[in-house]
Amino acid sequence: MASYYFYMSWNPQYAILIALSTVFTYAGGIFVEKCVSMKCRYTSRNFMRKVILIGCLAVNLAMLGIFKYGNFLLDSLDAVVRVFGIEIVSRRFDLLLPVGISFYTFQALGYMIDVYRGDITAERNLLRYALFVSFFPQLVAGPIERSGNLLKQMREMEDIKLWNAKRITSGAILMVWGLFMKMVIADRIAILVDTVFDQYYIYGSTELCVAAAGFALQIYCDFGSYSLIAIGAAKIMGFTLMENFCAPYFAVSVKDFWSRWHISLSSWFKDYLYIPLGGSRKGKLRQAVNKMIVFSVSGLWHGADWSFMAWGGVHGFYQVFADLTSPYRKKCLDQLKVKQECFSWRLLQTVITFLLVDFAWIFFRADSIMAALYYIKRIFIRPTPWAFFNGDLYTLGLDRPEMNILLFSVLILFLTDTIRVRKKILLDELLFAQNLWFRWGCMIVLVLMIFIFGEYGPNFDAQQFIYFQF
């Protein structure tokens, strides 16, 4: 009831979609499991199980397709037929995109596939399963939880101790750190990013590169903050959600980046799409095709626009190119006797990976593919190195004091992620390993920074979480 109330506070009507997805996958899971013991006279049990699975997938994907991709498909069809001189007067769907529909749909589909594979038993308690699909901390922007993790915990809910000081404090620490990333860093740098991307055609290479790097930081702090708030809120109530980010910009390859970025989605696509397509088991060519399919679908999952498809395609190309050239690059490095275990090599790998990822982010942020291509073109044809020294960077929405606050906050983020990589622990675990005075001192400083330097107030254009639109 609390989860449904939470969602209905945004739009009461669209709670019906969650209920439909819940009912279909709940019933589908039970029927798929019953088919194992049923005696079918005219057809095989496996055939019936597949029919039920496909039916549930079709219903959920149809809801997702209508609300998220209906207008995109109509516009794409219209653009194609216009090439042949055919005019189609298509009426666009006047539908508001339901917040978080991609997240809870994928969570329900993952449960259905798990039951079909026999990885878990079908949930008989409808209320418990409805809670799994609609669990409010991660309902609208993930992490996309697995039934084997979250539903299993809900089945053991009676064992959760209502009051546990360490657990509640740990969850609060994660929520405060998430609010710091969102309100102090993400919402502040969003001002600079929006200023440049909204009028990219008047800026030169320096401003465009700074804005592109700024968006990489913005989307990490924005999405990562929501995941931390969700994980922290769930932990306060006694539930453990999967980690969704692991210092992604410390990655030493694009493949490593995707093992650190939006982990719940990338692992979902790996388990439920890449491996069923054949993975790497059917030769290099098939592996390359499978990766391009997965990353293209990942781009489409993020938004109904060709620019998102391009973003996914670029990442797919990175992966395929890395696989094809791996033997030659290794041979070349061995010939040149490059030390590959030292800090300087890892630093170079990290910088190159960030530049590749940041290049792809331009397609993600731009309004269209053409806008992204023109943005990239201006980086190369309009050099403005003097912008670093003449104060032009302070005219992009953030003055000098605001920029200094941003740089100081980013330094705190960098140190925290460095510890995350080296110690392999989250901030709450790190603080619990310290003395009480240090722990509370850090938390008080973060809270004060949120209140003093956070972007909010009557004159501020509040920034919703970016991934709410997906």
Image: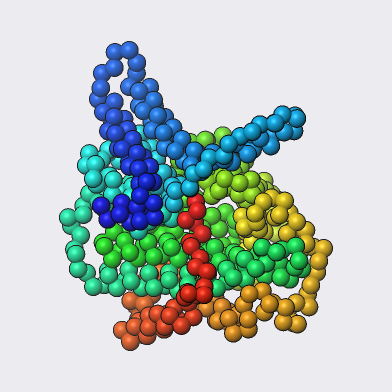
Residue 193 position within the rendered picture, expressed as x and y whole percent measured from the top left = 62, 67
Q: Is residue 118 visible?
A: no
Which of the 4 quarters of the picture holds residue 109? top left
Which of the 4 quarters of the picture holds residue 198? bottom right
Which of the 4 quarters of the picture holds residue 365? bottom right
Q: Residue at x 63, y 74 (%)?
A: 397
Q: Residue at x 34, y 83 (%)?
A: 440
| Residue 185 against residue 19 in the figure, above or below | below
> Is 380 in front, or is 75?
75
- Residue 177 lies left or right of residue 6; in this view the side is right
Q: Is residue 264 visible?
A: yes
Q: Residue at x 63, y 39 (%)?
A: 75
Residue 145 position within the rendered picture, expressed as x and y whole percent measured from the top left = 37, 51
| Residue 188 against residue 15 in the figure, above or below | below
Residue 432 position within the rendered picture, expressed as x and y whole percent measured from the top left = 33, 76
Residue 279 position within the rendered picture, expressed as x and y whole percent measured from the top left = 53, 39
Q: Residue at x 75, y 77 (%)?
A: 387
> Is 73 in front, or is 433?
73
- Number of numbered labels in the structure image: 0
Looking at this view, name the residue that lies furthest to the right: 381
Looking at this view, name the residue that lies furthest to the top: 42
- Which color scheme is applied? rainbow
| Residue 10 against residue 33 in the figure, above or below | below
> Is 83 in front, or is 315?
83
